[in-house]
Image: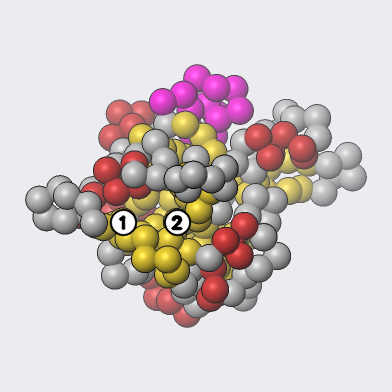
Amino acid sequence: MCGRFSLTVRREEIETALPAIGVPDAAGGRYNIAPTQLSPVVRLGEDDKTRVILARWGLVPRWARDVSIGLRLINARCETIERRPAFRDAFRQRRCLVLADGFYEWCGVPGSRGRRPVYFRLKGGGLFAFAGLWDVWRRQSDEEMVTFTIVTCPANRTVGQVHDRMPVILEKGSVWEKWLRARNAGILRALLRPLDDGKMEGWGVDPVVNDPRVDDGRCIRPVGGLSFLAQDDGRMI
């Protein structure tokens, strides 16, 4: 599961990485993005050009009666997205890139019922995208709300020390175009796999991240000496 993520890079870096239209002024500079909040996603417009928009985290299918279903649909398991009614049409027609540069998971603390937040990112940092799905929900007032979900897969060994699932991470490059434009289900399924262990790192962070109102550098600052890093021989430290 992915329940929080970050996009600390600034708007200018997003514009450099993406040949897309309309990067919002509010894009980037976020340390603690939580469900129901707005975050930038990349999707294809009706003109087949890539566009960056702000969308609400937590997919609300167009057939839903009310928006509350979105809290149960912040993630979509890759094994079932082609079958679940909430996701199957979006998988075929409405895929998006959820821009990010890190995410959080929580691990148990020996001798305690508490859980410790851990921050994961690409080794050395940098912008990437989660595989996402989007939809448009219309209120009775005809107001439209664009929402999204993050696709998850089994965890690699790095993240697996903390949680058995992780978001599908798509690195910059041609794979972004494939996820947005491919029409062959086999090509799309091949992208839904854990990122290689050696490309990731993680560390324990301050529990301040548990409060979605806190959105600053404290959320990703290492504390407590916890380190999750895949070595070349597959060992962890």
Relative to 124, say whether 237 is above or below.
Answer: above
Q: Residue at x 43, y 50 (%)?
A: 130
Magenta span: chief secondary structure: loop
The residue lying furthest to the front in this view is 111
Q: Which mark is residue 51?
A: none
- Disc 2 is placed on an element classified as strand
The extreme bottom residue here reads: 12
Q: Residue at x 51, y 34 (%)?
A: 76
Q: Position of residue 195 (x, y in %)?
A: 29, 47
Q: Which mark is residue 228?
A: 1
Q: Disc 1 residue type?
A: Phe
**Looking at the image, residue 187 lies above or below residue 206:** above
160 vs 102, left or right, is: left
Type of amino acid at the residue the image marks with label 2: Val
Does residue 62 belong to the magenta stretch? no
Label 1 crowd (10 A; few <14 / some 14-19 / many >=20) = many
Q: Quadrant of the C terminus?
A: bottom left
> Can residue 177 be spotted in the picture?
no
- 130 vs 71, left or right, is left
Callout 1–callout 2 Cβ contact below 8 Å: yes
Q: Please tell me the numbered disc located at residue 118.
A: 2
Q: Quadrant of residue 55?
A: bottom right
Q: Which residues are magenta?
A: 79-92
Q: Position of residue 156 (x, y in %)?
A: 29, 42
- Give the residue at x 42% y 70%: 222
Say which of 165 and 101 sits in front: 165
Secondary structure of the residue carrying numbered label 1 = strand
